[in-house]
Amino acid sequence: MQSIHKEINDGPITVNLLARAISNGMSRQSKKMSDQEAYEIAFHVLNFFGYTNYVIDNMLEPEDRDTFYLLEDIGVLDTEREETTLFDGREWRIHYWMLKPENVRKLAQMERKDQVDDRPMESKVYDELPEEIWRSRS
């Protein structure tokens, strides 16, 4: 348990950490996403960032950009733009996507509203047994 807290509070943003933040952020908006889907999105998105906290928007395909907008909605990404003047006097804008590590960590620590229970139905039966039954068997 201590290693999970260490991962959340220190070090780089890992796939598992971002996946947990995505899953929690989606549940905060009353949208459901499986842990596997959140992991796949986190893995895909972090491949764009590599070892930096920003990505130039021009590298994204439209489907990727949609995913980035989704992550902006839950608060783990933000946009920024920079303007520069070219040699011929025209203005040039560069759009960036910025990873927000502090928000990723906050979301990853939150309790999910609708924790998805992926266990088989057979094992859920034991959850409904009263505490007295467990005590009498020990």
Image (cartoon, grey):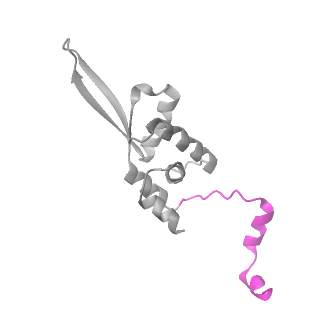
Q: In this view, does 27 lie above or below 138?
A: above
Count of marks, rendered view = 0
Magenta span contains residue 104:
no
Q: In which quarter of the image is the N terminus?
A: bottom right
User: Residue at left 73%, top 59%?
Assistant: 119
User: Residue at left 78%, top 60%?
Assistant: 121
User: Residue at left 54%, top 52%?
Assistant: 16
Image position, residue 57 (x, y; %) = 40, 29
Q: In which quarter of the image is the C terminus?
A: bottom right
Q: In this view, does 116 lie above or below 67?
A: below
Image position, residue 92 (x, y; %) = 27, 21
Q: Is residue 66 above or below residue 129?
A: above
- The answer to whether residue 122 is left or right of residue 87 is right
Q: Is residue 134 above or below residue 20?
A: below
- The answer to whether residue 104 is left or right of residue 130 is left
- The answer to whether residue 103 is left or right of residue 44 is left
Image position, residue 94 (x, y; %) = 31, 27
Q: In which quarter of the image is residue 96?
A: top left
- The answer to whether residue 6 is left or right of residue 90 is right
Image position, residue 118 (x, y; %) = 70, 56
Q: Which of 14/24 is in front?
A: 14
Q: Which of 95/46 is in front?
A: 46
The region drawn magenta spans 112-138
